[in-house]
Image: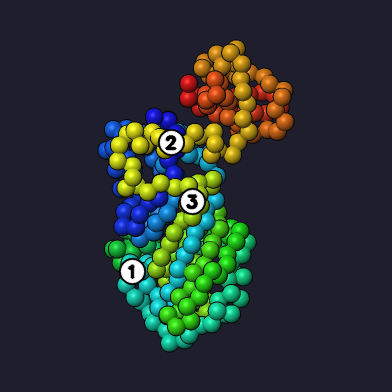
Amino acid sequence: MFGFLNVYKPKGMTSHDVVAKLRRVTKIRQIGHTGTLDPFAEGVLPICIGKATRLIEYLNDDKEYLATIQFGSNTDTYDLDGEVTATFDKKVTQKEVIEMLKIFEGEISQLPPIYSAIKVNGKKLYDYAREGKDVEIQPRQVFISKIELKSFDDVAQKAEILVACSKGTYIRSIAYDLGQKLNCGGHLIKLIRTKAGKFLVKNSIGLEKLETPEIVRENLINPTDMLELPKLKITDEEYKKVLQGQYFYNNSIESNGFLILIYNNSISAIAEHENGKVKVKKVFG
């Protein structure tokens, strides 16, 4: 098997659990995902099967989420799985939430949660947290291309927001930071990933349906449909050079950068083009 799967990860499972199930179903070890979803989160989880795992780095990493934030309290994990660390009496209004969301637009500096898998000195942050040790967390630059309020429950003090963002953005941190800026506290209670690059939630398939190798194969997506790279159909002679890892020249390509080499209607390699010279990076056959 060779291709991508647009899997809908259910709540209560880790991203690795999804990979482990698909390995059991397909009997294929070479399976990976393109970006972790926390166990309490659900939604789009792109899966790469077979040699398609070597294409992960070329996929668009922009994400989109539908997040529900509970105002009135903070937790140590910034989500519903953590221990409450502070409570607040202040009530916020829909207007206040809408106005405050504006400061999160564009490039922002974000401090990741202490309960996260980011490594500091070779050790994951959540390991420091579980051991009760202090560690200096460095802020990271992330980009929020869209953030908007979708619904607001004034009585329950809950807000549902849509966030379109760059790779590495922590929605839990947005929930916490929003609560801090509104002086009412806040933590994430629900998270649905609705988009990951070109993988959309409306086209995803529930993990529970992927019970046989045949069903997995039927739902495989051709990598050329999901990679946002220029495509070049190569000749028999060029294909021979690709298999030998040799470069060749092709002046029909307009811009420099990575591209997909197509032979017999399937992907044969990822190459890099510079001023007419095509250098093979990864060969798929």
Q: CA distance from mark 1 to mark 2?
A: 37 Å
| Residue 36 at least partly seen | no
Front one among 215 and 260 = 215
The answer to whether residue 265 is left or right of residue 45 is right
Task: Identify which residue is drawn at 59% across, 74% down.
Answer: 98
User: Residue 159 or 38: which is nearer the viewer?
Assistant: 159
- Mark found first going from the N terminus, 1 or 3: 1
Q: Is residue 8 visible?
A: yes
Residue tagged by mark 2? 220
Of the residues shown, which amino acid type is indicated by label 2? Leu
Q: Residue at x 60, y 12 (%)?
A: 237
Residue under label 1: 82
Secondary structure state at the residue bearing disc 3 = helix
User: In this rendering, is residue 143 above or below 56?
Assistant: below
| 151, above or below 140, in the image | below
Q: Is residue 47 shown left or right of residue 16?
A: right
- Please provide percent x and percent y for residue 85: 36, 76
Tag 1's secondary structure? loop
Left or right of 261: which side holds 172? left
Residue drawn 49% across the image and 55% down it: 194
Discs 1/3, front: 3
- 231 sits left or right of 15 in the view: right
**Which marked residue is nearer to the observer: mark 1 or mark 2?**
2
Residue 103, image x and y in percent? 61, 70
Residue at the spot of label 3: 202
Q: Nearer the viewer, mark 2 or mark 3?
A: 3
Quadrant containing the N terminus is top left
